[in-house]
Amino acid sequence: MKKLLSLTLALCLFLLPAMAETAPDAFTSASVNNFYGGIDGDELMNAINSYSGFYAVASVNPDGTPNIGFYIYGCVKLEDKYYLQLGLSPNQTTANIDNGSELVAMYGCLPAEGATYPTSGARMNLKKVEDAAVLEELLKSAPQGYAPLYYEVTLVRPLG
């Protein structure tokens, strides 16, 4: 199970520099075959908010190398759009965000009973929320004293 997850994450990381350096959308064109299932919409939001499964957020370092972190994040729905709620302490990922790196998140559902690895989940393209009115509304859902970063989920693809 760990090997498959590691390979999936490595593939995502491999694609990040291509996304940052070229005009084509490597994230969606890297594979036209999906061998694992996907979830989206409210089902994905509820799965993410169950805080069980496999979570990762990938960014690109200033030198073009991939950076991936295990961050458990939440999901909020506002006016038929979904937003990831990231509570990140200052680290390389937040530095990459400040430098304009795109973010890609992965959520893998816990394996089904009898399975040895995750076979369903989602890969998500994210866009930083900059609109002050939207941020104000999203912050109403945050626990008191908690100021997370919010990213709109702009594209959802199957786990792989």
Image (cartoon, rainbow, N blue to C red):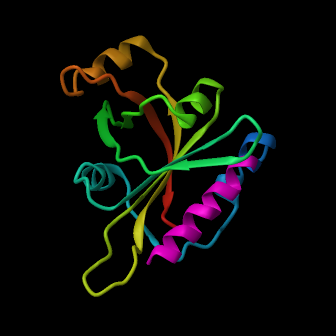
Residue 85 belongs to the span the image colors magenta: no
Residue nearest the observer in this picture, 109 or 95: 95
Q: Is residue 15 left or right of residue 38?
A: right
Residue at 24% in and 27% down: 142
Which residue is farthest bottom? 114
Is residue 56 shown above or below 88?
A: below
Image quadrant in which the C terminus is located? bottom right
Image quadrant in which the N terminus is located? bottom left
Residue at 45% in and 33% down: 151
Which residue is farthest right? 22
Which residue is farthest top? 132
Residue at 55% in and 72% down: 34
Q: Position of residue 79 (x, y in %)?
A: 31, 30
Q: Magenta region, mostly helix, strand or loop?
A: helix
Number of numbered markers: 0
Q: Position of residue 52 (x, y in %)?
A: 26, 59
Residue 8 belongs to the span the image colors magenta: yes
Range of magenta residues = 1-17
Residue at 67% in and 48% down: 66
Is residue 119 shown above or below 158?
A: below
Q: Position of residue 136 (x, y in %)?
A: 32, 15
Residue nearest the observer in this picture, 20 or 46: 20
Q: Position of residue 115 (x, y in %)?
A: 33, 84
